Amino acid sequence: MIRWFKVGVFLGCLGPLARLAWKAYAGNLGANPIEVITHSTGDWTLIFLLITLAITPLRKLTGQLWLIRYRRMLGLFAFFYVVLHFLTYIWLDKFFDLHEMLADVAKRRFITVGFTGFVLLIPLAITSTTGWIRRLGGKRWNQLHRLIYATAIAGVIHYIWLVKADLRKPLEYATVLGVLLAYRLVVWAGPKIQSAPILPRRRAEASEG
């Protein structure tokens, strides 16, 4: 049952690509198909990044420990869609013109931050296997994979700087990301805040004694 459900999740993650391919086949990508493909793959990159980041809070808040089985797959699909997003840019938009691409990265800030997010995601995809987890060890692997926070932030900033005018959609992504990061901050800081008053109290008691 679990295996079939995982297959279903996998096929569901391919759904956006299948829909995009069908629209291209049917000639329904509109007057600017490259822009449609670019925006669609970019949107789904952010969606999968946010879903991946949501796995841990959902697992802890709901007690559904089985959710962790899908975090790696969802993270790899985020990488899959960002590769498609990047390929659309370098192939369909720039026709592999390296000079023009480097000029874009240097001069256009939304491309600079987007490219940064893409580069940060590469080591996460490479080290997502069980073998790499063993090589790096749990602690170093976890430290490396915190880059996903920087990647998600870069992706949201990339989107905000890209659209400039209608910020509703990128701000929706920014709000979800802010909630997910705030949750992690509370989880990290909560025990430290609770234990902070204990030391002064103990010192006061020792001085009185």
Image (cartoon, grey):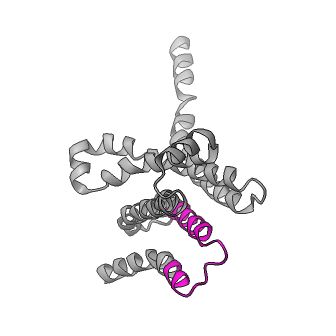
Which residue is at 55% across, 39% downward? 189
Q: Residue at x 55, y 30 (%)?
A: 196
Main SS of the magenta part reads helix
Across and down, in percent, residue 177 comes to 60, 54
Residue for point 63% across, 58% down: 176
Q: Give yes or no for residue 5 being in the magenta stretch.
A: no
Q: Can I make out residue 61 in this image?
A: no
Q: Position of residue 38 (x, y in %)?
A: 57, 64
Q: Farthest residue in the bottom direction?
A: 26
Residue 152 visible: yes
Residue at the outermost right position: 165
Placement of 95 over or under 9, stated as above or below: above
> In terms of depth relative to the viewer, which is nearer, 172 or 92?
92
Query: Can you say whether 157 is above or below 64 in the image?
Result: above
Quadrant where the N terminus is found in the figure: bottom left
On the rendered structure, is 157 left or right of 196?
right
- The answer to which quarter of the image holds residue 130 is bottom left
Task: Determine if the magenta segment contains residue 24.
Answer: yes
Q: Nearer the viewer, residue 101 or 159?
A: 101
Span colored in magenta:
20-48
Q: Residue at position x 67%, y 53% from top?
A: 162
